[in-house]
Image (cartoon, rainbow, N blue to C red):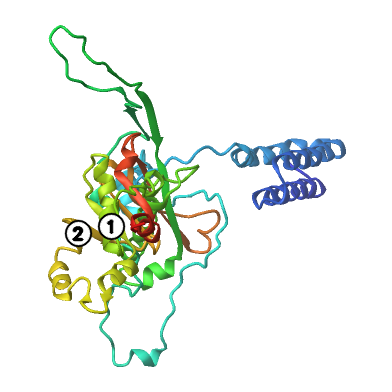
């Protein structure tokens, strides 16, 4: 149908009005219901006043239909894929010979549940005269290191293909084995086993940075991945000690551990060394074999430097120096200095009873969030999913208490 100049003007004005409403919807200024109402009102208004021009206008609306439908459809859960899988999906069904000639661009849209609260990573460049004479470039970055992960080194760590771990716990014992005479009835032992389980928890971090930073800084990707990995490993290690186990948190060994209560040990003037030995003894009293002592570095240093007025160092420094290669230890059990242990606290135990199951190993993915593609801002997401638990009955393999409390408990009364 060929339109007059006046009719074409009506169609163009209506299309412009609808596009304006669609733009408001994309920008979040109106919701789906308001968009439907405004598009319907505009269409009814034009239909009533310009019957001859409705056909072309409906065609224009149809052209917007797919876009409106896509925007109105509910969002589903994100399907996480490796970069390799995303690349394979991007070229699926395409003519590889043609792609080799013309090339193509792949973008990944990552949905974000919150707002970006940190600045986007950009490059701070030195003045030109600071680069004369021309410098050699060290591509590794300078940074303050984060606490290295230590709990994994001493715990029961295995991979798992499932997001939940289940196990059987024996429960409270009733009765016990006994000596039996000829012809006499045997003694009975009993318990009520129960099934328990733990779900995988997610440890994540993301970083926004510009494409310019990626282009201009040699080794940027490797250093960025290192930073994300270190951040996640630091948090994970802290959770393995201090996690409370509720909602999104892992349950750490400290949450399972028992307070010190073995008051039959008595010392006249207890030291930190005495507190450690007493805590280890409580673990042994429950027939577990402790394999690690976790302490804050400040407490370890104070322990090493402790002196008496007559005998000098409680632990001779030559002995300390000899022990440093293998790590400071007592009773043959190594002391691990860990900043994730609060100063003044002591965590000892048989960490083979702390079970770590890696459901999704550490991964780093790249993509664009929202309209960041227009601003050359890339989002890197690092995450892992892990299960951590202690089985019922094995919580006695750990003691977590303040050094002061243990000293007070073992002080000769």
Residue where numbered disc 2 is placed? 330
Query: Residue at left 24%, top 50%?
Result: 154
Please tell me how many numbered marks the rendered image carries: 2
Residue 352 visible in rendering? no
Answer with left or right where residue 336 lies relative to residue 48.
left
Mark 1 closeness class: few <14, some 14–19, many ≥20 residues within 10 Å: many
Distance between the Cα atoms at labels 2 and 1? Answer: 8 Å
Foreground residue among 64 and 171: 171
Residue where numbered disc 1 is placed? 276
Question: In the rendered image, which quarter is residue 406 located in?
Answer: bottom left
Classify the position of the N terminus by image quarter. Answer: top right
Could you say where residue 25 lies in the image, as x and y percent from the top left?
Answer: 68, 48
Query: Residue at left 59%, top 39%?
Result: 70
- Residue reaching furthest right? 49
The answer to the question of whether label 2 and label 1 lie on touching residues, with beta carbons closer than 8 A, is yes
- As drawn, 33 above or below 223: above
């Amino acid at each position: 149908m060929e339109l007059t100049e006046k009719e074409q003007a009506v169609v163009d004005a209506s299309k412009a009005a609808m596009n304006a409403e669609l733009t408001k919807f994309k920008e979040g200024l109106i919701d789906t219901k308001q968009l439907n109402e405004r598009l319907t009102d505009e269409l009814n208004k034009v239909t009533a006043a310009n019957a001859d021009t409705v056909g072309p206008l409906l065609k224009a609306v149809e052209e917007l239909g797919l876009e409106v439908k896509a925007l109105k459809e509910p969002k589903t859960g994100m399907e996480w894929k490796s970069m390799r899988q995303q690349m394979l999906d991007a070229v699926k069904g395409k003519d590889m010979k043609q792609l080799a000639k013309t090339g193509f661009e792949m973008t990944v849209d990552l949905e974000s549940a919150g707002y970006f609260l940190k600045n986007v990573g950009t490059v701070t460049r030195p003045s030109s005269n600071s680069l004369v004479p021309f410098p050699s470039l060290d591509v590794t970055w300078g940074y303050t290191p984060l606490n290295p992960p230590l709990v994994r080194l001493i715990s029961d760590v295995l991979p798992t293909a499932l997001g939940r771990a289940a196990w059987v716990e024996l429960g409270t014992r009733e009765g016990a084995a006994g000596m039996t005479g000829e012809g006499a009835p045997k003694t009975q032992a009993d318990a009520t086993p129960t099934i328990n389980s733990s779900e995988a928890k997610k440890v994540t971090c993301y970083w926004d940075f510009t494409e310019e930073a990626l282009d201009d800084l040699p080794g940027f990707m490797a250093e960025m991945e290192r930073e994300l990995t270190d951040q996640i490993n630091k948090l994970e290690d802290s959770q393995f000690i201090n996690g409370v186990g509720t909602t999104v948190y892992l349950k750490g060994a400290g949450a399972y551990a028992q307070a010190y209560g073995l008051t039959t040990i008595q010392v006249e003037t207890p030291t930190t060394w005495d507190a450690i030995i007493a805590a280890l003894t409580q673990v042994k009293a429950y027939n577990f074999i402790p394999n690690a002592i976790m302490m804050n570095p400040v407490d370890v240093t104070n322990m090493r430097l402790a002196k008496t007025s007559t005998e000098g160092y409680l632990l001779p420094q030559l002995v300390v120096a000899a022990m440093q290669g293998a790590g400071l230890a007592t009773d043959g059990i190594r002391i691990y200095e860990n900043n994730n242990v609060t100063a003044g606290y002591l965590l000892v135990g048989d960490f083979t009873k702390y079970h770590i199951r890696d459901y999704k190993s550490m991964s780093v993915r790249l993509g664009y969030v929202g309209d960041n593609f227009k601003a050359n801002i890339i989002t890197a997401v690092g995450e892992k999913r892990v299960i951590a638990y202690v089985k019922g009955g094995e919580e006695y393999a750990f003691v977590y208490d303040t050094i002061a409390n243990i000293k007070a408990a073992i002080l000769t009364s």
